Image (cartoon, rainbow, N blue to C red):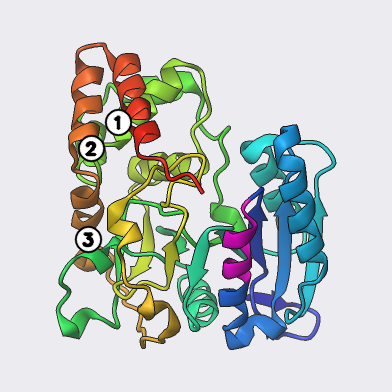
Amino acid sequence: MVINHTNNAIEPAPVIVTVYNREHHFKRCIAHLLECKEASETVLFVNSDAAGSDRDKKAVAGIRRYIDRITGFKKVVKVYHRQNIGSAKSYAYIFNKVFNSYDRCVFLEDDILVTPDFLAYMNKALAYYEDNKRVTSVSAFSYSMFFDIPIEKKKNVYFTHRFNPWGFGIWQDRFVLGQKYSSEVILNDLQNKNLIRRFNTIGIDLLPSFKYLASNKKALTLDLMHVFHMVKNNLVTVVPYSSKSFNIGNDGSGTRTRKGNRFINKDLKFLHECVEFQFVNNIDENMENSFSYKIYDSFFYRLKLVAMKLGLLDYGIRVKNWWAQKNVVVD
């Protein structure tokens, strides 16, 4: 939600959707967004990177033809990159562009589907927690969907140190890009036993990822950078017990995700339902990190953790990537 200081009117936060070459996923993403009644008052920014190879040119061209036909939003701002700049630079560009005019935004990748009350939840949460600086973002997706949740909690929200990029809202003053912490700072911080313990309580996958990227002088991805920043500074994201989004990119089509049966087999009927939501104020009394910990408590993440401790992390990464290739879905 953005306050127009000229007339004190309140308008919905702009929505960013990034897309590359997955037209089917992208069309479903837009269709679900249009089910939100706030869509007609929402400015949509579509960020389309150029083809990085000849084989992707046709797909990118087809997606841009579809973008040119999108209606139903207050305005569609098309950002077409003339040359392929990659996801990291593409993200930096679109966020900078939006934050030049707005103090907050909602972000989706092309493989995220949302519920009809997604925009209502996002805008109300961004307004409700605007002055609470410990809350760095508003997440739409919740891993709680894979666990039995007491009925009395269904409409509540909780807090976690684990940032999730699968549909989120964020304020300009709390957005963190990849250059926030250098590789040297990250490696130095990873010597802190208390910090390590806090990372491990929200997912045993994190420490090896931080270590691997920093050791190889690679910038952390957007989600990893936010997690690092949040845990280090005891910050949180707010999450609904009843998820407002779902990632269909775990079908093997994504660049950083492998095929996941937990996601492929999930009944998506909930995406057509609106579940009442209410916000809570006491962060420490409503902390819940166990969902993400349980989700990432797997053999391969434990293998990476052991490999890191033995100085064999690069080998562990290769084993994980090999296994991912064996489970890729080919359309």
Name the residue carrying label 2: 204
Q: Is residue 52 magenta?
A: no
- Disc 2 crowd, CA 10 A, few/some/many (<14, 14-19, 20+): many
* Residue 222, image x, y percentages: 52, 43
Mark sitting earlier along the chain (1/3) = 1
Using the numbered discs, state the Cα–Cα distance from disc 1 to disc 3 in whole angstroms. 19 Å
Q: Is residue 142 visible?
A: yes
Q: Which mark is residue 190?
A: none
Q: Amino acid at mark 1?
A: Leu
Between disc 2 and disc 3, the foreground one is 2
In this orientation, which residue lies closer to the viewer: 280 or 151? 151
Name the residue carrying label 3: 288
Residue occupying image coordinates x 34% and y 51%:
162
In this orientation, which residue lies closer to the viewer: 152 or 113? 113
Identify the magenta region.
22-30
Using the numbered discs, state the Cα–Cα distance from disc 1 to disc 2 in whole angstroms. 7 Å
Viewport quadrant of the N terminus: bottom right
